[in-house]
């Protein structure tokens, strides 16, 4: 099944490239912040768009790494996300973040608590425990990195998800896109993905659902409890037999959990 969305170009000024926001659907607004695989339109977003207006922006510097010179801290990136959201004129919205995007989503909900109606964090980065360190995927081989992010099950499906397009031009463009997207993410999380989020999460006012893949090889499941203990109105949903990217392993289960939470009064 081909998954497609529209693209809305958001001009930000300040010498920054326009942000190409993937969007689809109608209804209450949902903003989705992507994880380590970069911006893509997957089954979770497509399912959400059946009941919501979904907006999935890129990370800052996704196309022009030199632009990252304008972003010294995670706070700069959070304000950048707010600049994009305000250009979209969404008002109050639901916010979902996966992995690195979960870290940014939590920062956003803490900095702008009045803007976020409900918050969903899917296997978020952002905290650190010496007894259960987050795995270092940066220098892993491509096969190892794929296993860390997507899990070891359904290997053929994982390869298909990450396969490069045909044609030299499209292939080279996708290689560059992936490299610059990962570089922009590492700018904010390397070498340790912890920037003081724990001490700011008390400000999160939105009811929060914490979705975690039971077999996450990057961020141990114990971190789910850490996030839940720091966010007042939170609940945990564990997805069995799922990796750091449960929406890949169990897209229907993650979609069902997310929609049920968003629809709940």
Image (spheres, rainbow, N blue to C red):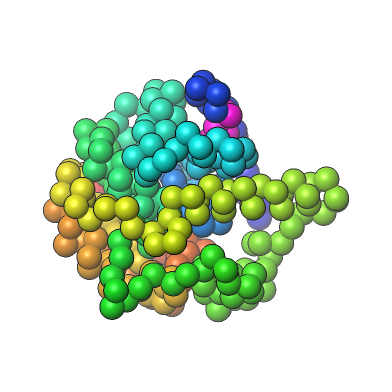
Residue visible at 32% across and 53% down in the picture:
195
Up the image or down, 12 lies above or below 41; here it is above
Q: Is residue 29 visible?
A: no
Residue visible at 53% across and 47% down in the picture:
184
x, y (%) of residue 81? 41, 35
Residue visible at 82% across and 54% down in the picture:
166
x, y (%) of residue 116? 27, 38
The quadrant in which the N terminus is found is: bottom right
Left or right of 119? Residue 167 is: right
User: What secondary structure predominates along the stretch shown in magenta?
Assistant: strand
Residue 19 falls inside the magenta stretch: yes
Task: Place residue 86 in its image quadrant.
Answer: top left
How many marks the image carries: the answer is 0
The quadrant in which the C terminus is found is: top left
Q: Which range of residues does the magenta coloring cover?
A: 17-23
Left or right of 64? Residue 166 is: right
Residue visible at 50% across and 54% down in the picture:
186
Q: Nearer the viewer, residue 79 or 48?
A: 79
Q: Nearer the viewer, residue 179 or 53?
A: 179
x, y (%) of residue 236? 25, 64
Up the image or down, 148 lies above or below 9; here it is below
x, y (%) of residue 150? 53, 69
């Amino acid at each position: 099944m081909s998954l497609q969305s529209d693209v809305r170009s958001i001009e930000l000024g300040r010498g920054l490239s326009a942000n190409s926001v993937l969007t689809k659907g109608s209804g209450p607004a949902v903003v989705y912040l992507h994880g380590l695989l970069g911006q893509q339109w997957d089954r979770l977003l497509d399912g959400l768009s059946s009941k919501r207006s979904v907006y999935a922006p890129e990370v800052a510097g996704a196309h022009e790494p030199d632009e990252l010179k304008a972003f010294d801290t995670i706070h700069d990136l959070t304000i950048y996300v707010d600049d994009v959201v305000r250009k979209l004129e969404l008002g109050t919205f639901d916010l979902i973040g996966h992995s690195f995007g979960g870290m940014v989503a939590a920062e956003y909900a803490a900095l702008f608590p009045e803007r976020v109606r409900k918050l969903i964090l899917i296997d978020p980065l952002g905290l650190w425990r010496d007894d259960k360190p987050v795995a270092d995927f940066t220098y892993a081989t491509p096969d190892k990195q794929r296993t860390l992010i997507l899990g070891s099950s359904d290997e053929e499906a994982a390869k298909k998800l990450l396969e490069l397009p045909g044609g030299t031009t499209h292939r080279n463009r996708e290689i560059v896109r992936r490299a610059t997207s990962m570089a922009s993410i590492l700018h904010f999380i390397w070498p340790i993905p912890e920037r003081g989020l724990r001490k700011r999460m008390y400000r999160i006012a939105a009811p929060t659902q914490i979705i975690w893949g039971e077999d996450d090889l990057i961020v141990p499941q114990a971190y789910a409890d850490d996030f839940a203990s720091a966010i007042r109105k939170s609940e945990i949903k564990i997805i069995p037999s799922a990796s750091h990217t449960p929406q890949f392993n169990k897209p229907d289960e993650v979609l069902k959990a997310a929609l049920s939470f968003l629809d709940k009064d």
